[in-house]
Image (spheres, rainbow, N blue to C red):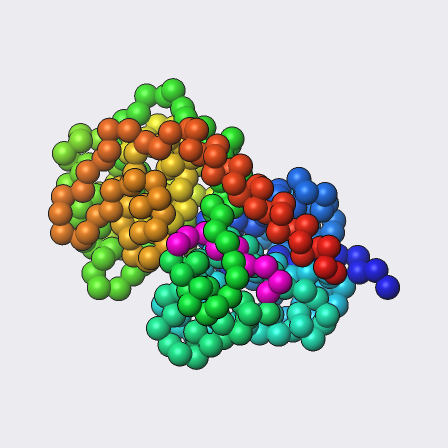
Amino acid sequence: MKRPIDVILCGYYGFGNLGDELIAESLIRLLEKNGVPAERVVLLSAEPRGWSGKSVGLVDRWKPVPVMSALRSSRTLLLGGGGLFQDTTSLRSPLYYWGVTRMARLAGCRTWAFGQSIGPLQNRIAASLALNALSACEARVVRDRGSMDMLENWELEGEIAPDTVFVLADELSESAEEKDNLLVNIRPWQGGLPEAAAEAAEWLRKERRLEMTGVALSEEDVLVMEDLRKRGVFRPSEIVRLSSLAQARSLWGKARGAFGMRLHFCLISVLARIPCHAVPYDPKVSFFAEEWGMPVWDGSSKPLLPDHAGDGSKVNDQRRKVEESFARTLKKVLSGV
């Protein structure tokens, strides 16, 4: 019997992190461009009622029975983008995605991975879970050299393609508005990095004589920046909880530069052609900064803003690469079902 669903999207969706919601939106757009309509796509989400994107099917990721039912109705399961296999915070993330992959196998649903960052994996159990899950994938596409190195160490085939959010580039083109604002993103992290980053941002604001806006991609960013402001370490004119690309277009349209921690904060800056100084709390940020020639703050030196941002031709090239890689990978997976 033909299965009514082509792809189930599984990622860190529904947790209020704009970067991951943009990954979901970009993947759905790529699927549609390649002949998979939204009605043949299901999204596993932690908060299905909060989804405001395309009209895909929605299933609560925490309910095993509905998840298994969806997997039995689907041709494939897509581990769709982001750092799903990492144990920086806990073992829960690799355990969850390994578990869904095992469920997919039991349901006769083929698994593939696209847009992954793998690691850090400091725990041997987490590494084993990641290896087992990725070994079960029909295709593996990662978004940075470090992740590709891990696949090669595991003797798994794969390829590198840019972050899927590059397909949304047209919605964040360069603005001609007056630019007098410094955008700053600080997320929770250990080792005093948020405090040090806040102090560096303050120095940069004063040095460049700019207004400063705190930009939160998730609620936890809001909480940490509000705490830093209350302690007098961080003095933005406002803290904005970013919830859409349209809102990002407005903010980055008035920005002279950006200084921040999250990967997709840096990526949005590239798409908007705004000079950015990255704060690499995670290897994926370091790899992205290196790819784009973006200065990386080492935690002690004075931050700086480049005189220019990434050129539009490279952005278009990255978008083309991710579109071509996705089309090729999807065709390979679906043709084998």
Residue 309: quarter of image: top left
Is residue 141 within the magenta segment? yes
Query: What is the span of residues highlighted in magenta in the rendered image?
Result: 137-145
State whether the magenta stretch is mostly helix, strand or loop.
strand
Please report the residue visible at 35 percent of the width from the left and 28 percent of the height from the top: 254
Q: In the rendered view of the protein, which quadrant contains the N terminus? A: bottom right
- Which of the two residues, 186 or 85, is positioned nearer the viewer here? 85
Point out residue 100 in the picture as x, y percentages from the top left corner: 60, 70
Q: In the rendered view of the protein, which quadrant contains the C terminus? A: bottom right
Q: Is residue 263 above or below residue 272?
A: below
Q: Decide if residue 202 is on the left or right side of residue 134.
A: left
Task: Examine the rendering and report whether any part of residue 52 can be seen.
Answer: no
Q: In this view, does 201 lie above or below 139?
A: above
- Which of the two residues, 110 or 215, is positioned nearer the viewer here? 110
Q: Which residue lies furthest to the right in this view?
A: 1
Task: Examine the rendering and report whether any part of residue 253 can be seen.
Answer: yes
Point out residue 109 in the picture as x, y percentages from the top left corner: 70, 66
